[in-house]
C-alpha cells in the first residue's frame, strides 16, 4: 500500500506540468465560461422560463454533448497522456526496477487516470452550479436561485463517471501498449462513433458495449419528452450498463497487469 | 560475492541472447563487463535487475535469490540502463526529486547528488535541454540517489567527452575505495575498462569467454610494439635474425610482442644501426577483436 501511495504521489508530481493534468481543470472551466457567456448574452430570451427549465437547459447544454463527444474524447486523451509520460522518457524500465511492487506502480498509474476523470467530472458539477448561481446574481431576472438541482447533477455526473470506467480501462491498456498516439486515438475514435450510433439507435445490446455507456447514461436520464418538465429527469444510477462498465473495467485492469509484466520491459 | 549467477540463459524469439552465463562479482570490485555491441550485455543487465525473466538459471545478489527477494535486492541497487531515462519536461532537480519521493530519500540528498555530478548550475533547466553528457551525469546521479551498495551501469560513458569520461572514472573509483561500493559496469571499450576495473568478464554472442581479475586479463592481453619503418620486410628479417619474434608484417608496420621499455630501445637501436629508417615505434594494446581471438583460440 505504501508503494501505491508513493507511486500515486509521483504520478501527480510528474504530470502536474503537463497538459494531461491541466486539461482536467481547463476543460470544465472553459465550457462553463462559454455557457455562462451564452446565457448572459441571450438572457432576454430566457427570462420567461421557469427556474427548473432554466437549470435543465443550462446543465443539459453540457450534458447533451458530454456522453457522445466530450467524455469519450477526454478519456482517450487522459489515458494516453498518463502513459505517454513514460513512453516519451523511456522510463518504463526505471519504473519497474524501483524497489516497489510492480502492481503498485501499475495500479497507481491506472488510478491516477481514474482520479483525473473524477476530478474533471466533479469540476463540471461544481462549475455548472457555480456559474448558474453566478448568473442569478449578475442577471437577477434569470431565476436560477429559485430551484436547486445540486444532488441530481451530482448523481448524473456520478453515473457518467461509472459509465466511463470501461472505456478508460480499454484506452489505458491501448495507450500502455502503443507509444504512438494515433493507434489508441484512432481505435478509440472509431469505437466511440460506433457507441454513439448503437446508443442513439437504441440497439438492444448496446448496454454490453462500453463505448456506448456514457451516451446511454445521458439518454436514459435526460428524457426528450416535451410534456411536464418535472418528468424529464429520471435518475437511476445503478443500471445494468453501469454494472457492465464496472465489470469490463475490472477485467481489463487485471488483464493489463499481466500484459504489462511481459511487455514493457524489453 | 555480490552478484553470482548460474547457468543464466535468455532467448528472444528463436535467438538465444544469453547462454548459460556464470557471473561472479566480488564485493568491493569494479567489475568490467566487456563485449562488442549486441553481445548480450544489456540483456544480462536487464536479467540482473529482474526486468526480464530468465529462461533458465539462477541469479543471486547479496546472497539472495532475485526471484524471492526482488524488492529488498532492488532497494540496494542503483542502475543506469542504455540511455538515461529522464522526464524531459521536468528540470534536472525535479527528476531527482521525483525519484527521491519514490525511494523515500530526503530532499537534501538531491542537492548533494547535483553537486556530485556538477549539475547544480543547470538544476533548474529542463532535462530535455541537457546535452548528452549532462543527461548521462544526471542518470548517474539518479542511480546514486539512494546510496546503493551496488551500482549497475550500462555503458555510462557513452556520449561523454574525454573530461566527462575521466570524471566518471574517478567518481566510480572513489565510490569503491572510500565508500565500499561494488560497481558492475558494461562497455565495449577494453581500454576504458582496463583503466578502472579490478575484475573483468568478457562476453561474446551471449557466452562468457573470460572471467577473472584484471591481472589475469593482462596476462592474456599482452601488449605489442608497433614499428613503422621505410622497409618493413627488411626490418622484420633483420629483427628475426637477431632473435626478435616478429608477429605481423604489413607494408607500413610490423608488430613485436612487448617485453619492456629497454627492449623497445634495443629494437630501435638495432634498426638504426643497420640503416633501417624508423618512422615511429610505439607500445600498443591489443584491441578487443584480437583479444577475443586470442581467448577463443586458447580456450
Image: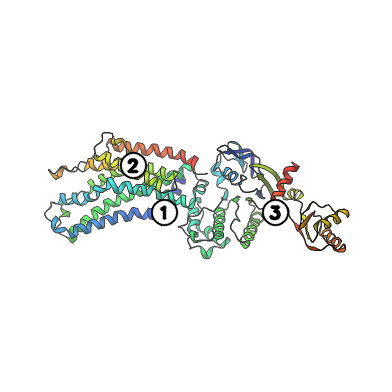
Which residue occupies 36% across, 44% down?
Answer: A188
Quadrant of the rendered image containing residue A33: bottom left
Callout 1: SS: helix
**Number of residues whose C-alpha sits closer than 10 Å to that of mark 2, classed few (under 14), some (14–19) or many (20 or more):** some
Mark 2, mark 1: which one is toward the viewer?
A: 2
The mark tally for this picture is 3
Q: Earlier in the sequence, mark 2 or mark 1?
A: 1
Q: Position of residue A66 (x, y in %)?
A: 27, 48
- Labels 2 and 3 within one chain: no
Q: Kindly give the residue lying farthest to the bottom in the view shown.
A: B121
Callout 2: SS: helix
Residue A198 is marked as none
- Labels 1 and 3 within one chain: no
Distance Cα–Cα, label 2 vs label 1:
27 Å
- Residue at image mark 3: B194
- Labels 2 and 1 within one chain: yes
In the image, taking residue B218 as reference, residue A251 lies left or right, namely left
Distance Cα–Cα, label 2 vs label 3:
58 Å
Q: Kindly give the residue lying farthest to the top in the view shown.
A: A204
Which residue occupies 86% across, 61% down?
Answer: B270
- Residue at image mark 1: A15
Instruction: Report whether residue B90 is seen.
Output: yes
- Residue at image mark 2: A191
Distance Cα–Cα, label 1 vs label 3:
43 Å
Label 2 marks a residue whose chain is A
In the image, taking residue B270 as reference, residue B195 lies left or right, namely left
Q: Position of residue A151 (x, y in %)?
A: 23, 46
Q: Please name whichever residue, B279 or B293, is drawn nearer the observer in this view of the structure.
A: B279
Mark 1, mark 3: which one is toward the viewer?
A: 3
Q: Please name whichever residue, A150 or B49, is drawn nearer the observer in this view of the structure.
A: B49
Instruction: Report whether residue A1 is seen.
Output: no
Label 1 marks a residue whose chain is A
Amino acid at each position: 500500500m505504501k508503494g501505491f501511495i508513493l507511486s500515486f504521489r509521483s504520478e501527480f508530481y510528474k504530470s502536474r506540468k503537463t497538459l494531461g493534468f491541466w486539461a482536467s481543470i481547463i476543460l470544465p472551466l472553459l465550457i462553463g465560461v462559454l455557457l455562462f457567456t451564452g446565457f448572459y448574452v441571450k438572457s432576454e430570451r430566457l427570462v420567461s422560463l421557469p427556474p427548473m427549465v432554466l437549470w435543465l437547459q443550462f446543465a443539459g447544454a453540457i450534458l447533451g454533448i458530454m456522453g457522445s463527444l466530450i467524455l469519450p474524447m477526454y478519456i482517450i486523451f487522459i489515458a494516453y497522456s498518463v502513459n505517454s509520460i513514460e513512453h516519451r522518457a523511456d522510463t518504463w524500465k526505471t519504473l519497474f526496477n524501483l524497489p516497489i511492487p510492480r502492481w503498485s506502480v501499475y495500479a497507481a498509474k491506472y488510478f491516477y487516470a481514474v482520479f483525473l476523470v473524477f476530478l474533471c467530472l466533479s469540476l463540471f458539477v461544481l462549475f455548472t452550479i457555480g456559474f448558474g448561481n453566478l448568473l442569478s446574481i449578475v442577471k437577477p431576472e434569470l431565476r436560477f436561485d429559485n430551484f436547486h438541482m445540486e444532488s441530481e447533477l451530482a448523481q448524473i455526473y456520478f453515473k457518467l463517471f461509472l459509465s466511463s470506467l470501461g472505456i478508460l480501462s480499454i484506452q489505458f491498456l491501448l495507450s500502455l501498449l502503443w507509444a504512438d498516439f494515433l493507434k489508441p486515438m484512432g481505435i478509440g475514435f472509431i469505437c466511440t462513433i460506433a457507441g454513439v450510433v448503437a446508443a442513439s439507435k437504441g440497439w438492444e445490446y448496446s448496454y454490453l458495449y462500453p463505448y456506448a455507456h456514457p451516451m446511454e447514461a445521458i439518454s436514459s436520464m435526460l428524457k426528450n419528452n416535451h410534456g411536464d418538465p418535472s418528468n424529464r429527469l429520471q435518475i437511476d444510477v445503478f443500471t445494468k450498463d453501469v454494472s457492465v462498465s464496472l465489470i469490463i473495467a475490472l477485467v481489463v485492469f487485471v488483464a493489463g497487469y499481466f500484459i504489462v509484466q511481459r511487455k514493457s520491459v524489453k | 560475492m555480490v552478484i553470482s549467477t548460474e547457468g543464466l540463459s535468455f532467448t528472444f524469439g528463436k535467438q538465444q541472447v544469453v547462454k548459460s552465463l556464470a557471473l561472479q562479482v566480488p564485493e568491493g570490485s569494479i567489475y568490467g563487463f566487456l563485449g562488442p555491441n549486441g553481445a548480450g550485455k544489456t540483456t544480462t543487465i536487464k536479467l540482473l535487475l529482474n526486468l526480464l525473466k530468465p529462461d533458465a538459471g539462477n541469479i543471486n545478489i547479496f546472497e539472495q535469490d532475485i526471484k524471492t527477494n526482488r524488492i529488498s535486492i532492488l532497494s540496494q541497487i542503483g542502475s543506469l540502463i542504455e540511455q538515461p531515462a529522464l522526464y524531459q519536461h521536468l528540470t534536472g532537480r525535479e527528476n531527482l526529486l521525483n525519484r527521491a519521493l519514490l525511494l523515500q530519500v530526503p530532499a537534501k540528498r538531491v542537492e548533494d547528488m547535483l553537486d556530485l555530478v556538477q549539475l547544480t548550475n543547470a538544476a533548474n533547466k529542463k532535462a530535455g535541454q541537457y546535452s548528452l553528457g549532462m543527461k548521462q551525469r544526471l542518470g548517474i546521479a539518479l542511480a546514486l540517489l539512494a546510496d546503493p551498495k551496488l551500482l549497475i551501469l550500462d555503458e555510462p560513458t557513452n556520449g561523454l567527452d574525454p573530461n566527462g569520461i575521466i570524471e566518471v572514472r574517478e567518481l566510480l573509483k572513489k565510490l569503491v575505495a572510500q565508500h565500499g561500493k561494488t560497481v558492475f559496469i558494461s562497455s565495449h571499450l577494453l581500454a576504458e575498462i582496463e583503466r578502472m576495473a579490478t575484475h573483468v568478464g568478457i562476453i561474446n554472442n551471449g557466452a562468457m569467454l573470460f572471467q577473472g581479475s584484471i591481472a589475469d586479463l593482462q596476462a592474456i592481453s599482452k601488449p605489442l610494439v608497433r614499428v613503422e619503418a621505410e622497409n618493413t620486410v627488411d626490418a622484420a628479417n633483420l629483427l628475426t635474425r637477431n632473435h626478435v619474434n616478429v608477429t605481423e608484417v604489413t607494408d607500413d608496420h610490423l608488430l613485436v610482442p612487448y617485453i619492456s621499455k629497454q627492449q623497445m630501445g634495443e629494437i630501435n637501436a638495432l634498426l638504426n644501426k643497420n640503416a633501417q629508417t624508423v618512422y615511429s615505434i610505439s607500445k600498443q594494446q591489443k584491441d578487443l577483436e584480437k583479444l577475443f581471438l586470442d581467448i577463443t583460440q586458447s580456450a
